[in-house]
Structure formats: structure tokens, C-alpha cells
Image (cartoon, rainbow, N blue to C red):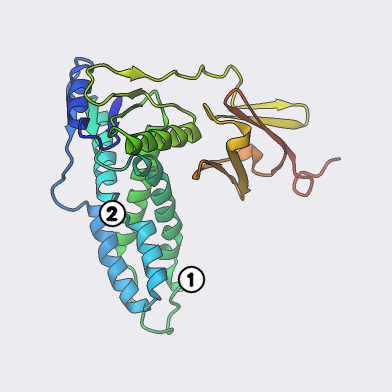
Amino acid sequence: MRAHLVVGGGEHAPTVTGRVAAGTSLRPTVRSHRAGEGTDPVLEAIEHHLDRLLDALDLPSPVVADLVGRLLPPELPTLLRLARSLDQAESDDHELVAEVDLEVARVLDLPQRVARAFAAFVPVVARWEVLVAPEGVGALPAPEPPVLAALREGADLLERLDAAIADPEVTAVHLAAPAGPVGAARRADAEVLLALMGRTLTAVHPDGGSGVENLPVSPAADLPSLERRGEEWLLHIDLPGVRAADLDLVRHDDELVLGCAGRTRRVLLPSVLRRCDIERAGVAGGVLTLTMTPDERVWPRG
């Protein structure tokens, strides 16, 4: 299965979507529409419980706004429909051509962020009586059973959507942005966010043009992503087009937070490196290389 996502919000996006659909293989093509009918069951369950919970907790308005923004961004219904469309296309062995009528940065960035927010909320709901409302303390409503299932399903759907977008073997990303500065800004956002995923744009479709401007594809690195050299481990992460001066790198527990041009992405360290320290980091040829050594506090020598 290969999915083709037309993003960018340009007026010519429907034309591009039709052109991409016409150029796909002879297998049936599924078209995703801008508007969906009904409410996704994941969204319905979480919204219902969140309203009850926030009313009972009587939290300050800024806290409520932050929580709702993380769990229920306005783009969530579209992203859930897209995730389900991808699953259905894979199940049916169809190709998916989807015009995604959202800001390109939100399409590329939100699935990971919301999936993590859902996943972080799962243990809170699962252990509600221990962590939030012990028996006899107040009268907070207990989460309804469908809420936990909805959080888990939503996290799984969005994680798979994020992985599909990040994989050029699965998803082609076609940019059909407006002309002028807005389109240029959206292209820059797409290039940065995809670079942090280790890939480039598949194609840019010029406004009013019948052709496709193919972007240069970075050659695949010959180095393995993880290798052992003596007592050191080398971790290689593709960041096509990113220079060392433009990259921000922070380690947070078992994750790396990669930043460039105001955009960020989290990368989970391989399990063998989670008890190692970063000794050196460098970027060359669009590849970030981390040199890591075992933490002597957890890997005693001799």
C-alpha cells in the first residue's frame, strides 16, 4: 500500500489530487474527502468525559485551555479520519489519495504530539483511584470504561499515522501550497518537519502548472543506523538538508528532542542506548551522528 497525501491548502489542491489519483497504479484508488460524516468514536468518548471531568475539577481557565488544546485540537477529527482511511486502504490493498485540508505543519506535527498526549493520559485514567481521586476524597467522577479504550485507540491510530507519514516507502507527500509568501512559508515548514523525520518532500506541484517539480532526494546513507565500535555506540539519524548550526539537540530521559527553525520532533532512543551517555554529536551530509558510551553508574566495569 502506498498513500499519497496532498497538503498545503492551495486553491489548486483538488486539481493536484485528481492528477495524482489518475497517475497511481491500476489497483483501486480510495479518495479521502474534506468533510466527514458523524463523530469519530474516539473523539466522542474523550470529549464527553473531558467535559464532565473539567466541570468537576473546577480548574483555572489557562489549565483547561492547555489540556483541551493538547488532547482535542481542532484538526483532530480530520487526522483520525485520515488514520482510519490509511488503515482501511491497507486492509483492502488499495492506494489512498487524500487531499488533507489542513495547515501542512499541523498535518506533519500533530499526530506525534497528540498521540503522546493520549498515551500520557492513559495511566492517569487507568489508576484514577490511586493517582487522582482516592476513595473518600471528594466526589470526583470516575472515568467511564470507554474513555480508557478511546485513549488507547486514539494513541495507536495517531502513532501509526505518524509512522506512515515519516516513511517514504509508505507515504508520498505532495505539496500544493498557495502562491506567494504563504506558500513559501508552508513549503519551508514542510521541508523542516520532514527533515526531522528523516525524509524530504516527494513533490511540489506549481500553481496553475500541469507538471510536477520533483525535489532532489537525499541519497540513502550507507551507514547502519546503529553500530558498535569498541566500547562506544554510534547512532546515525538522517536529517536531510539540516546543518549543524541549525540543529538543536536535547536529551530528555529515553528520547532525543530534535529542533530546527522553531520545529521539534521527538525520537525514542534504541533500548540498548537508554543507559548510555552522549559523548559527542555532529552533523555531516545531512546525518546526525551521536557517539554514546555506557553510563558507569548502571554499567559498572570490572
Q: In the image, what residue occupies the spot 20% across and 22% down?
A: 21
Where 220 falls versus 39 (above or below)?
above
In which quarter of the view is residue 108 placed? top left
* Viewer-nearest residue: 145 or 245: 245
Q: Are the two marked residues, 2 and 1, in contact with CB atoms closer than 8 angstroms?
A: no
> Percent from the top left, x then y, of residue 207?
25, 26
Element type where label 1 sits in the image:
helix
Question: Is 302 placed left or right of 164 in the picture?
Answer: right
Where 297 falls versus 54 (above or below)?
above
In the rendered image, which residue does mark 2 sit on? 74
Looking at the rendered structure, the kind of residue marked 2 is Pro
In the rendered image, which residue does mark 1 sit on? 131
* Viewer-nearest residue: 135 or 13: 13
Q: In the image, what residue occupies the spot 22% across and 51% down?
A: 40
Mark number for residue 95?
A: none
For disc 1, the neighbor class at 10 Å (few under 14, some 14 to 19, many from 20) is few
> Percent from the top left, x then y, of residue 99?
23, 34
Q: In the image, what residue occupies the spot 43% across and 76% down?
A: 133
Q: Most extreme residue toward the left, as rendered?
A: 37
